[in-house]
Each structure stands twice: as structure tokens, then as C-alpha cells.
Amino acid sequence: MLVVFSVRGENYQDAGIPVTYVGHPLADVIPLEPDVAAARAVLGLDAGPVIALLPEARLSEVKRHGAA
């Protein structure tokens, strides 16, 4: 199994499936250090705290983390 997220590989390994992490296709496109000022300008955000909710695709993840 070839996986793009290293954490997913652990699930397959635990099940006895050979797995290789091949990397994420956007890893070379997205900078490691984002330009925060530019991002705020593009998104129209003023200075101050920003909260982002980034749940995974599964509803169970949203329910588990949303209750915290």
C-alpha cells in the first residue's frame, strides 16, 4: 500500500499490510513558513487571534474533537 499521509501507514502496518509512505503531492508546493501577513490580507482578517476548525473527513472525528 502506498500512502500520502504517514499516520495512515500505521493503520495498515497494524493490520499486517506492507505500506510505504510516498509523500504528499502538495509537500513541495506549499511553503513550510507561510506569509501570515499576506494570508490575512487575502482573507480579509484583521490582526488578532484566529480560530480554525479543521476536522477530518469522518463525522466521528468531528463529534469526538468538537466536544472537547
Image (spheres, rainbow, N blue to C red):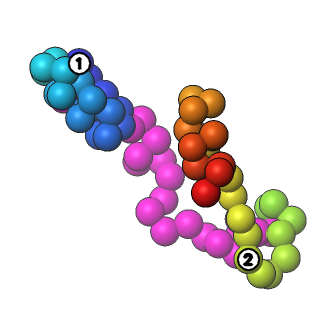
Task: Compare residues 26 and 17 and report the one nearer the observer.
Answer: 17
Per the rendered image, the range of residues in magenta is 20-41
Left or right: residue 30 compared with residue 5: right
- The percent position of residue 19, horizontal first and vertical second, equals 18, 25
Residue pictured at 23% horizontal, 35% vertical: 10
Above or below, 7 against 15 in this view is below
- The percent position of residue 24, horizontal first and vertical second, equals 38, 38
> Badge 1, how many Cα within 10 Å: few under 14, some, many 20+?
few
Tell me how far mark 2 sits from mark 1, CA to CA: 40 Å
The quadrant the N terminus occupies is: top left
Identify the residue under disc 2. Answer: 49
Identify the residue under disc 1. Answer: 1
> Badge 2, how many Cα within 10 Å: few under 14, some, many 20+?
few
The amino acid at mark 1 is Met
**How many labels were placed on the picture?**
2
40 in the magenta segment: yes
Asked whether residue 19 is in view, the answer is no
Q: Helix or strand or loop: what does disc 2 sit on?
A: loop
Name the chief secondary structure element in magenta: loop
The answer to the question of whether label 2 and label 1 lie on touching residues, with beta carbons closer than 8 A, is no
- The percent position of residue 4, horizontal first and vertical second, equals 35, 32
Left or right: residue 28 compared with residue 66: left
Residue pictured at 63% horizontal, 40% vertical: 63
The amino acid at mark 2 is Pro
Above or below, 46 against 10 in this view is below
Furthest-front residue in this view: 67
Q: On the image, which quarter does residue 68 sit in? A: bottom right
Q: Helix or strand or loop: what does disc 1 sit on?
A: loop
Left or right: residue 3 compared with residue 54: left
